[in-house]
Image (cartoon, rainbow, N blue to C red):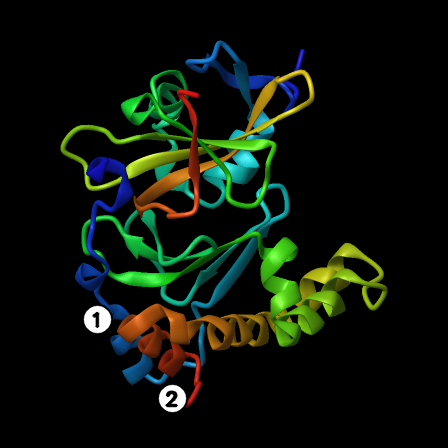
Amino acid sequence: MAGVEQIIETRELKTTHLNQERKANKIHPTFSFRYDDRADSALVLLVQPQEGLIVHYIDDHIGFLHEENSLEIVGLRIDAFARKFLPANQNVQHLWLDIKHDKVSDFGQLTVMFERIQPQVIQEVVRATWKMLGEQGSELASLVGISR
Amino acid sequence: MGISLQHSRFQATDPRGRIIICTLETWLFHILSNHPELAESADDIRRAIEKPQYGFIYRDVDYENRDIYYYRPSSQKYSYIVVVEFDEMNRGEVITAYRISKRKSGERIIWPE
């Protein structure tokens, strides 16, 4: 079943773009967090993708998002985000509940609030996952300002 | 007359004979919004359901009512993954679809039984 199990080795995935972004010392202009409530999955983009995205799972819930041809890592996908990831990661859950609950009264406010805390959510997501992501996880941690 | 988002983008029948639809809403707001590179991939996604890789259907790691279908186009370094949710009547609806280069190890084969 090699055709489906693992098509690309994890060590083949590259972090050149993550490094370049970190060295450019940008204030995270390209960070993006998207949540699909139907699939219960979260997409964290740390670098603006230049190609189509592919998911490379590291375990049953977390995978790298990488570009199709360059194999550059640009972010993370987290499945069962509300069902499993949030209950297991209180810091992320607190931020998430701030968005979802009564502190927000209308859609405009929701958008503003989400824009404001998006970098925090991303940082906490990376903080909760980077150690299980191997060498490439360290690059993600550096990019969002987590000291290793 | 307008087209409702509940209209199907496509319909497929899996190897068990179960009918599965992908609504326009799912296609636009749950697949293309996150993966615009799949704009021309509806036929591949339908094929994953109709003729999954090696004939296998998997059960989702977290949801007992969701099944997983894979299809790897020849000479490509990825597989399509299609997540389908079934109701109590075994009617299926595509929840999401994207491409992977390594799948989850915890999914178990449920078909063939």
Would you name the residue on which mark 1 appears? A16
| Position of the N terminus of chain A by quadrant | top left
Would you name the residue on which mark 2 appears? A148
Amino acid tagged 2: Arg
Q: Quadrant of residue A110?
A: bottom right
Q: Quadrant of residue B8?
A: top right
Residue A103 in the image: x percent, y percent? 83, 68
The residue positioned 41% from the left and 13% from the top of the image is B15
How far apart, in angstroms, are the residues tagged by discs 1 and 2? Answer: 19 Å
Residue A32 in the image: x percent, y percent? 49, 63
Amino acid tagged 1: Thr
Question: From the viewer's perspective, is B31 left or right of A113?
Answer: left
Residue A31 in the image: x percent, y percent? 46, 68
Label 1 or label 2, whichever lies nearer to me, is: 2
The residue positioned 38% from the left and 88% from the top of the image is A148
What is the chain identity of the residue bearing mark 2?
Answer: A
The residue positioned 43% from the left and 79% from the top of the image is A144
